[in-house]
Amino acid sequence: MDRLTPEQRSRNMSAIRSRGNRSTEKAIRFRMIRAGVRGWTLCCGDLPGRPDFVFESERLVVFLDGCYWHGCPKCYRAPASNTSYWSEKFRRNKARDRKVGRLLRKQGWRVVRFWEHEIEARPERVVGKIKDLLVIRPLARLCASAGSG
C-alpha cells in the first residue's frame, strides 16, 4: 500500500469540496425536481450550519451528511495515521452538528439529516421522506386553524 507524505495528504484533503457533491446534493436535487418537490433553495448562507436544502415557507432544513466527515456509525472508518488529530476532528464535527440542530430548532426550524449511504442506496426514499415532511406541516396548520373558528 502506498503511503502519502503529509504534504500530499494535505493537498488531497484540501481538494475535497463541501458543496456540490455529485453523490449527494446533485442526486437529491435532480430527484426532487423530477418528483415535483418545490419551494426549496440551496444552501442558505445565513442559517447556522449551511443546510443543503432550505424550505423556508415550511421551516424545514435538510442536511445531507457525508459518512466520512460526519462520522456515520454504519460506514465510518478511522484513518490509520495521525489518529489523535482525526478522532478529535470528527468529535468536533459531530458536536457542531448537534449544536447546529439545536440552534435551528430553537429558531423554529425542523431539521432532518440524511447519511450519504442512504442517499446512494435509495435516493428516491430520501426524497419521499422529504415530501412527507412537507405534507405534515401544512396539515398541522390546517387542523389548528380549523379548530380555532
Image: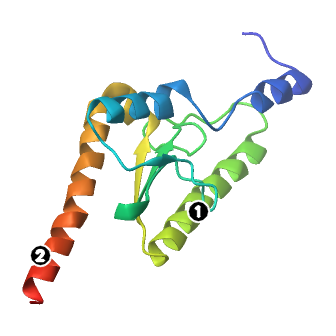
Question: Is 26 situated above or below 146?
Answer: above
Residue drawn at x 48%, y 48% is 41
Residue drawn at x 73%, y 40% is 83
User: How many labels sit on residues?
Assistant: 2
Residue 68 lies in quadrant: top right
Helix, strand or loop at mark 1: loop
Quarter in which the C terminus is drawn: bottom left
For the view shown, which residue lies furthest in the right direction? 7
Q: Are marks 2 and 1 in contact (CB under 8 Å)?
A: no
Residue 14 lies in quadrant: top right
Question: Is 134 situated above or below 3?
Answer: below
Cα distance between the residues tagged 2 and 1 = 29 Å
Check disc 2: other Cα within 10 Å, few if <14, some if 14-19, many if 20+.
few
Three-letter amino acid code of the residue under disc 1: Leu
Horizontal and vertical percent position of residue 52: 51, 46
Q: Nearer the viewer, residue 23 or 57?
A: 57
Quarter in which the N terminus is drawn: top right
Question: Is 61 situated above or below 13?
Answer: below
For the view shown, which residue lies furthest in the top direction? 1
Check disc 1: other Cα within 10 Å, few if <14, some if 14-19, many if 20+.
some
Q: Earlier in the sequence, mark 2 or mark 1?
A: 1
Three-letter amino acid code of the residue under disc 2: Cys
- What numbered label is drawn on residue 47? 1
- In this rendering, position of residue 40 left or right of residue 139: right
Q: Nearer the viewer, residue 126 or 85?
A: 126
Horizontal and vertical percent position of residue 118: 36, 35
Residue receiving disc 2:
143
